[in-house]
Amino acid sequence: MLRVGDMQRSVKFYTEVLGMKVLRTTDRPVQKYSLAFVGYDDESRASVLELTYNYGVDKYDLGTAYGHVALEVDDAAKTCEAVRAKGGKVTREAGPVKGGTTVIAFVEDPDGYKIEFIEHKK
């Protein structure tokens, strides 16, 4: 679960920039929060991200415990190009991980969460 400062902005990033789908949403006005579950496939077949917007909170301190979300991709460089073309922020270009051969890259979502692309080994 990621807490987000603007649900529409975050859903737009995860769907339009990263190509996920909105799987379901919930709005709880009495409890003052909204949820959106996004992913690449149905929840019964794949992992999904829960985005949580708490009414009136537009920014969070990410803290030191959070690292990043990792997604496997076919081609990290092409995925970075696609993210950049859609206005996304690439923070580490595709290249081998230090001391290894696995190709990785990093992007950042609108709330500052890091997302790692790990290139599928062919």
Image (cartoon, rainbow, N blue to C red):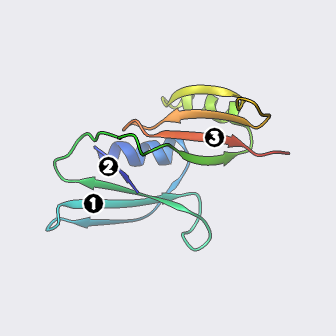
Camera-nearest label, 1 or 3: 3
Q: Secondary structure at mark 2?
A: helix
Q: Residue furthest bottom?
A: 44
Q: Is residue 75 shown left or right of residue 17?
A: right
Give me the disc on residue 117: 3
> Which amino acid, by three-letter code, is at mark 1?
Ser
42 lies above or below 39 = below
Quadrant of the drawing holding the N terminus:
bottom left
| Residue 121: x %, y % from top left | 81, 45
| Residue 12: x %, y % from top left | 42, 44
Q: Residue furthest right?
A: 122
- Residue at the disc numbered 1: 34
- Residue at the disc numbered 2: 7
Q: Residues within 10 Å of mark 1 (few under 14, many from 20)?
A: some
- Depth check: give the residue in front, 6 or 66: 66
Q: Measure how far apart labels 1 and 3 are at the Cα level.
A: 27 Å
Q: Secondary structure at mark 1?
A: strand
| Of pointers 2 and 1, the one earlier in the residue sequence | 2
When asked about the image quadrant of residue 122, the answer is top right
State yes or no: discs 2 and 1 in contact (Cβ < 8 Å). yes
Q: Secondary structure at mark 3?
A: strand
Q: Is residue 113 shown left or right of residue 29?
A: right
**Residue at position x 58%, y 57% from top?**
40
> Which amino acid, by three-letter code, is at mark 2?
Met
| Of pointers 1 and 3, the one earlier in the residue sequence | 1
Q: Measure how far apart labels 3 and 2 are at the Cα level.
A: 23 Å
98 lies above or below 12 = above
State yes or no: discs 1 and 3 in contact (Cβ < 8 Å). no
| Residue 28: x %, y % from top left | 22, 67
